[in-house]
Amino acid sequence: QGMSTAFIGLGAMGYPMAGHLARAFDTLVWNRTPARAQAHAAEFGSAAHELSSLAHADVIFSCLPTSGEVWEVLRALDGQLEPGSVWVDCTSGHPQAAREQAAWLAERGVHFLDAPVSGGTNGAEAGTLTVMVGGDAAVLERVRPRLAFAGKVVHVGPTGAGFAVKAVNNALLAVNLWAAGEGLAALKAGGVDLGAALDVINASSGRSNASENLIGQRVLSREFPATFALGLLAKDVGIALDVVAAHKGAAPLLGSAGGLYRAAERVIGGSEDHTAALKLVEQMNDV
Ligand code: NAD
């Protein structure tokens, strides 16, 4: 077993996250498209291997699109994982899946932490991600020194709590972004200069991360750089709605966001940047 770290899923987030690990620790990486793992090994000195050889690491990270893909790799590694090791899932996953995966791993002597991240690809590259962790606090203390990509680590509760917090955070991002798009569409239709309007909003109480960072750099610039897929944000809003439904809560605003982002995913395309959802707002408003 020894002290090796494994990282599964070298996507927009996983690639730079695993880069911080490889700079600090003996790190094995695996990606479904092997070229990406080979590029990682060349850039960061990680070792690219078959999936099965990652099973022997004492800490295994995953960062995949959804909990469904995490189940696929877990099943592929069944019978090979080391008792006493820790699986740290950095996917923005589903709280119910976290509970089922933690139980499945516990039967095999493996600990599970849901440890989704916030801070985007810039934060992943800078190694300043916020990590929200669900699961056993003592297990978190064991792996905390291994979280080389983190700027802030918060234990938020039992298994599944990390995914729930992440989903709610991203649902707020979705609502703020869409609302900013609606407001700016109204101003544009009324002939107001959007740069001037944004300048005011960002010095006023209507500002948000969406208005301060996303609207100017991605929407008004018409660049929409694809660093966080629209389909992934739509997925996150859906998870937040499942969290609401699990406790029979009332969240009509988030419910609307769920429908709107599913529509945007369909009309605009799930692999476009999440900010391209505002193209649908523009279409709806003829601006
Ligand atoms: P991505 O699409 O860039 O990367 C996904 C990775 O999963 C790729 O390495 C891909 O090869 C792998 N993969 C997909 N299907 C697979 C399968 N069936 N088996 C094995 N591997 C498979 O996504 P990302 O932007 O890196 O996001 C990963 C997770 O992090 C998502 O849950 C996302 O919601 C979350 N997240 C993303 C951001 C962001 O800004 N991009 C920020 C925070 C959290």
Image (cartoon, rainbow, N blue to C red):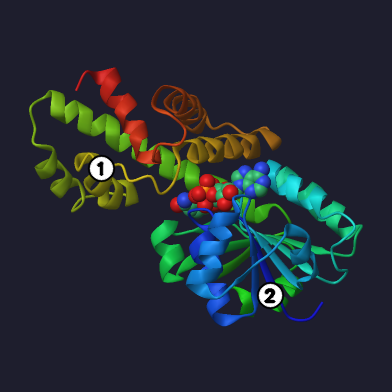
Give the left or right position of residue 220, taking residue 214 as reference: left
Q: Mark 2 points at which residue?
A: 143
Give the left or right position of residue 184, taking residue 150 as reference: left
**Amino acid at the residue labelled 2:** Val
Identify which residue, 70 or 283, lies in the foreground.
Answer: 70
Q: Quadrant of residue 158?
A: bottom right
Name above or below for residue 167 compared with residue 246. Answer: below
Question: How far across and down, in percent of the image, does residue 93 sit?
Answer: 64, 47
Give the left or right position of residue 224, taking residue 240 as reference: left
User: Closer to the N terminus: mark 2 or mark 1?
Assistant: 2
User: Ligand 1 within 8 A of label 1's CB?
Assistant: no
Q: Considering the image in quadrants, where does the C terminus appear? A: top left
Front disc: 2 or 1: 1
Q: Mark 1 points at which residue?
A: 223
How many numbered dots are placed on residues in this image? 2
Question: How far across and down, in percent of the image, does residue 98 sit?
Answer: 73, 50
Q: In which quarter of the image is residue 107?
A: bottom right
| Residue 166 seen in the current view | no
Question: How far across and down, in percent of the image, does residue 115 sit?
Answer: 63, 60
**Amino acid at the residue labelled 1:** Glu
Q: Residue at x 50, y 33 (%)?
A: 254
Name above or below for residue 59 compared with residue 205. Answer: below
| Residue 70 seen in the current view | yes
